[in-house]
């Protein structure tokens, strides 16, 4: 019985020590690319010329890409990246696109033929549906990246502006 109590006590003590060590070292494992990636919008729209936010973050961290190629992030993201990297704030390179108002995709379910092409195009799994069944967009997951629009053979997906409620004090 005493042996069991001693072993249990030792296990708890070791667990507590590991927890403290993890707490003190956990944040140190974040790379520069991780920090850059956290500042990117995560729409995964590929407008920056890279297949997603993480590859663009990797390219910036490796000094292979400038900080002004993300249209969804626009000036705000450029300012954040400049602050993180100690660089000058530069204008968005408009050859990669323009910053647009927030929007969310909407599927006209009466027109949808259930081809599933939009599901495969969506980088954030915001579309629900199955073959031959109508599809619908989970608005809270949709980033408005527009990647589902071109593949739709019946043009039944439109982007609607997102209206935000403004808190008043
Ligand atoms: S353009 Fe911006 S939001 Fe789109 S994938 Fe590139 S970094 Fe991400
Ligand atoms: S539903 Fe369309 S617009 Fe919304 S995130 Fe997916 S691909 Fe982008
Ligand atoms: S691509 Fe268009 S028609 Fe095909 S499932 Fe999506 S919304 Fe429906």
Image (tube, grey):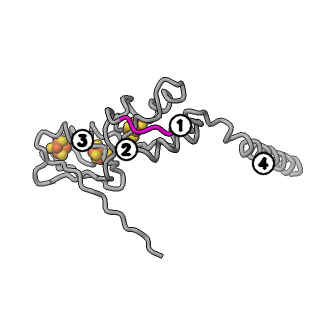
Q: Earlier in the sequence, mark 1 or mark 3?
A: 1
Q: Earlier in the sequence, mark 1 or mark 2?
A: 2
Q: Which label lies toward us, 3 or 2?
A: 2
Q: Which label lies toward us, 1 or 3?
A: 1
Position of residue 139 relative to residue 40, above or below, is below
Comparing 80 with 119, the one in front is 80
Residue on which disc 4 sits = 16
Residue at (74%, 44%) from the top-left corner? Answer: 24
Under circle 2, the secondary element is loop
Q: Which label lies toward us, 1 or 2?
A: 1
Q: Give how far apart the Cα atoms at labels 1 and 3 are.
A: 35 Å
Q: Give how far apart the Cα atoms at labels 1 and 4 are.
A: 44 Å
Under circle 4, the secondary element is helix
- Residue at mark 3: C-beta within 8 A of ligand 2: yes
Residue on which disc 1 sits = 88
Q: Give how far apart the Cα atoms at labels 4 and 2 are.
A: 43 Å
Q: Position of residue 147 (x, y in %)?
A: 27, 39
Q: Earlier in the sequence, mark 1 or mark 4?
A: 4
- Residue at mark 2: C-beta within 8 A of ligand 1: yes
Under circle 3, the secondary element is loop
Q: Is the residue marked by circle 2 packed among few (<14), some (14-19), or many (20+) residues within 10 Å?
A: many
Q: Earlier in the sequence, mark 4 or mark 2?
A: 4
Residue on which disc 3 sits = 148
Q: Earlier in the sequence, mark 3 or mark 4?
A: 4
Position of residue 145 relative to residue 49, above or below, is below
Q: Is the residue marked by circle 3 packed among few (<14), some (14-19), or many (20+) residues within 10 Å?
A: some
Under circle 1, the secondary element is loop
Residue stretch in magenta = 89-93
Q: Position of residue 4 (x, y in %)?
A: 83, 48
Q: Earlier in the sequence, mark 3 or mark 2?
A: 2
């Amino acid at each position: 019985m005493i042996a069991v109590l001693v072993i249990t006590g030792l296990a708890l003590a070791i667990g507590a020590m590991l927890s403290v060590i993890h707490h003190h070292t956990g944040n140190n494992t974040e790379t520069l690319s991780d920090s850059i990636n956290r500042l990117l919008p995560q729409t995964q729209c590929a407008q920056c010329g890279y297949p997603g936010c993480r590859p663009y973050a990797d390219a910036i961290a490796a000094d292979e890409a400038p900080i002004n190629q993300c249209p969804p992030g626009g000036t705000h993201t450029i300012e954040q990246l400049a602050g993180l990297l100690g660089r000058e704030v530069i204008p968005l390179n408009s050859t990669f696109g323009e910053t647009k108002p927030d929007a969310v995709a909407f599927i006209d379910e009466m027109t949808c033929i259930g081809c599933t092409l939009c599901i495969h195009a969506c980088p954030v799994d915001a579309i629900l549906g199955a073959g031959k069944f109508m599809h619908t967009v989970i608005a809270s997951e949709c980033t408005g990246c527009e990647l589902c629009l071109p593949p739709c053979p019946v043009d039944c997906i439109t982007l609607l502006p997102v209206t935000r409620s403004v808190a008043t004090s």
